[in-house]
Image (tube, rainbow, N blue to C red):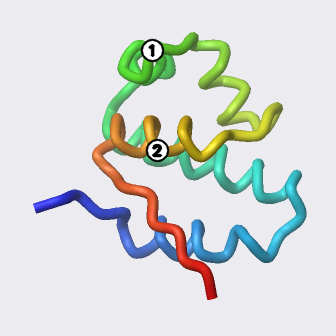
Amino acid sequence: MRPTAAPAARTHLAALHHQPEERRNLRIGLLIRELRLEKGMTQDQLAREIRTTKSAISRLENHSESITLATLEKVAHALGKVVHIELS
C-alpha cells in the first residue's frame, strides 16, 4: 500500500495553487518542516536522505527559495508521503 499525505497535508497542498508564489513557498516550507518533525528527522537527516545539503533544506523550510517538483517528490518520498497534483 502506498503512503499518502495526511488529510490536513492534502488540504494544505490543494490550496497552494490559489496563492502568490511567496505565500505558496512559505506554506510548502512550513509543511515540509511539520512533516519532517512528525517523522522525527533532523534537517541533516532529511538532506542526506535526498542527497542535498542541510542548508538547502533550511532554505526550503524558511521559504528562501522555490522548490522544484522533482525536489518536492524526493522530500515527500523521504518523509513517507506522496505528491498528488490535481488540475481542475
Up the image or down, 53 lies above or below 15; here it is above
Mark-to-mark CA distance, 1 and 2: 13 Å
Q: The residue under label 2 is which amino acid type?
A: Glu
Q: Quadrant of residue 32?
A: top right
Alpha-carbon neighbours of circle 1 within 10 Å: few (<14), some, or many (≥20)? Answer: few
Image location (x, y in percent) of residue 44: 47, 13
Give the position of the C terminus as an image quadrant.
bottom right
Which residue is at a point 33% across and 32% down the rendered structure image? Answer: 40
Which residue appears at 55% of the width and 36% of the height? 71
In the picture of the structure, the residue carrying the numbered disc 2 is 73
Left or right relative to 34: residue 2? left
Please tell me whether mark 2 sits on a helix, a strand or a loop: helix
Give the left or right position of residue 35, taking residue 2 as reference. right
Q: Which residue is mark 1?
A: 51
* Amino acid type for the residue under numbered disc 1: Arg
As drawn, 2 above or below 63 = below
